[in-house]
Image (cartoon, rainbow, N blue to C red):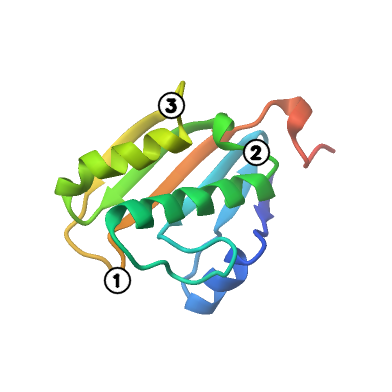
Amino acid sequence: MRRIVTVPVLSDAFARLGVPLTLVNTAGPTVYVAGLPPYDPETGELVHGDIATQTDACLRALTACLAAAGASLDDVVNVRVYAANAGHYRTINEVYARHFPADAPTRVFVPVASWSGEFDIEIDAVAYRDADDRGDRA
């Protein structure tokens, strides 16, 4: 059964954007996190700065989204990184490796031509929680 997860601060920030999406939802033990631009999980504001700063903000927002669903970065099985400049690949990897220091999930890196917003990166993810760890048991 699908369950929509409300993420403190971020769910309200995304709702204000007026984009028809669910930030996080679960289906059984699987957690789906929508593409996250670099939004600060504490303020809900878009983070401006270089690609390292934006990548870190995306991954901190991902961490907050997973926590709201009863998961963590350790539960992530797949990530997609969308970047406005393929030349940022090395820097993105350096920041990414700090958040996933060992046993990193599968990942796709997708260069994109343009964005609808003022940012250079967006990250989405899929996580899988053990049945014993789920907060949505019947």
Q: Position of residue 22 (x, y in %)?
A: 55, 60
Q: CA distance from mark 2 to mark 3?
A: 15 Å
Q: CA distance from mark 1 to mark 2?
A: 29 Å
The type of residue carrying mark 1 is Ser
The type of residue carrying mark 3 is Ala
* Nearer-N-terminus badge (1/2): 2
Residue on which disc 1 sits: 116
Identity of the residue drawn at 30% across and 44% down: 92
* Nearer-N-terminus badge (2/3): 2
Tell me whether the residue at label 2 lies in contact with that at label 3, contact meaning CB atoms closer than 8 angstroms.
no
| Residue 134, quarter of picture | top right
Q: Relative to residue 116, is residue 94 depicted above or below?
A: above
Q: Secondary structure at mark 3?
A: loop
Identity of the residue drawn at 46% across and 21% down: 103
Which residue appears farthest toward the top when viewing the image? 103
Q: Position of residue 47 (x, y in %)?
A: 41, 66
Crowd class of label 2 (few under 14; some 14 to 19; many from 20; radius 10 Å): many
Q: Secondary structure at mark 1?
A: loop
Query: Would residue 42 be found to the left or right of residue 18 on screen?
Result: right
Q: Which tag is nearer the camera, tag 1 or tag 3?
A: 3
* Nearer-N-terminus badge (1/3): 3
Tell me whether the residue at label 1 lies in contact with that at label 3, contact meaning CB atoms closer than 8 angstroms.
no
Please give the label number shown on residue 45: none
If the image is split into quadrants, where does the C terminus sit?
A: top right
Please give the label number shown on residue 104: 3
Q: Position of residue 91 (x, y in %)?
A: 26, 43
Q: CA distance from mark 1 to mark 3?
A: 29 Å
Tell me whether the residue at label 1 lies in contact with that at label 2, contact meaning CB atoms closer than 8 angstroms.
no
Identity of the residue drawn at 68% across and 50% down: 68
Identity of the residue drawn at 65% across and 59% down: 7
Residue on which disc 2 sits: 71
